[in-house]
Image: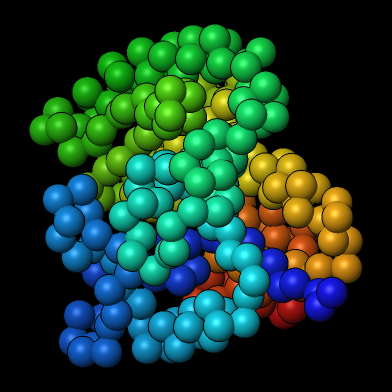
Amino acid sequence: MTNRLIVLSDLDDTWFSTHRAEPTEDKRLHLAAVDRQGAPLCFQTAQQSALWKLIERTADIIIPVTGRTSYAVERVTLLAQGGYTIASHGALVTLDGTIVPAWAEHLAPHLDEAKTALEQARNHLEPLVARLAPGGDIHLRVLHDLDVPVYLSVKSCAELPERLVAALSEASARFGLRLHANARNAALRPHYTCKASAARFVLEQLLERHPEDTVLTFGDSLSDIGFMGTGDMAVAPTNSQIWRQLQEFAQ
């Protein structure tokens, strides 16, 4: 049997970006994802599109590994329907849209504790957010995906204030949550939201009978490095957080 090529890949900022993050004068942009209303939202550059088409032609299995919820993954127009998906920062492993039973068993003992921690963190942060953004420019919301509590979402219309970033760090330690943050958004996540653990779980299923298969991983963020290390080779865009960090180390 010919060795299969299995690709595990992050999506946003690896294969496409929101329109505001790309040069609007570039007429070569390719639609990659839509919003809840079905309107165009995320696009690929010509180079991203060409490389993605190459991966589609050569890979036997493509598995998204993404911070998107399973519902948001469905709005990515690049992806074929079905197969494995690792969603919500690794909280969910689904197969053909349904949580894999063994993964559901793994999650079950932790769900009540996670729900309580996320709600407590939200209640703790709400007064500060109200003071920092009285106009409602910062939004806090506990997200559930297929009935699983997955993270406390923090979204801002502008760069997150330093006081809020510090408060998020304190809340993550206080309530036993993981913090993932960038310029405008942050997420406080239960400990089971781990892309690397989810990737290892899926690869155990796939490689058990085919250990000779080759695994290629793609990601852009430092938070992707854990799951990228589960493959035989890892690829990062040259405009990514990973690449910038590597450049700093190389100097």
Q: Name above or below for residue 48 compared with residue 89.
A: below
Residue 137 appearing in the image:
yes
Q: Nearer the viewer, residue 103 or 168?
A: 103
Residue 166 appearing in the image:
no
Q: Position of residue 219 (x, y in %)?
A: 59, 64
Q: Quadrant of residue 60?
A: bottom right
Q: Position of residue 187 (x, y in %)?
A: 45, 37
Residue at 62% of width from left, 56% of height from top? Answer: 224
Q: Nearer the viewer, residue 50 or 102?
A: 102
Question: Considering the image in quadrants, where does the N terminus appear?
Answer: bottom right
| Horizontal side, residue 96 vs residue 128: left or right | right
Q: Nearer the viewer, residue 36 or 249?
A: 36
Q: Position of residue 66 (x, y in %)?
A: 51, 52
Q: Position of residue 144 (x, y in %)?
A: 40, 27
Q: Quadrant of residue 4?
A: bottom right
| Horizontal side, residue 68 vs residue 99: left or right | left
Residue at 42% of width from left, 31% of height from top? Answer: 145
| Horizontal side, residue 184 vs residue 231: left or right | left
Question: Considering the image in quadrants, where does the C terminus appear?
Answer: bottom right
Residue at 86% of width from left, 55% of height from top? Answer: 209
| Horizontal side, residue 191 vs residue 26: left or right | right
Residue at 58% of width from left, 50% of height from top? Answer: 84
Q: Nearer the viewer, residue 174 or 191?
A: 191
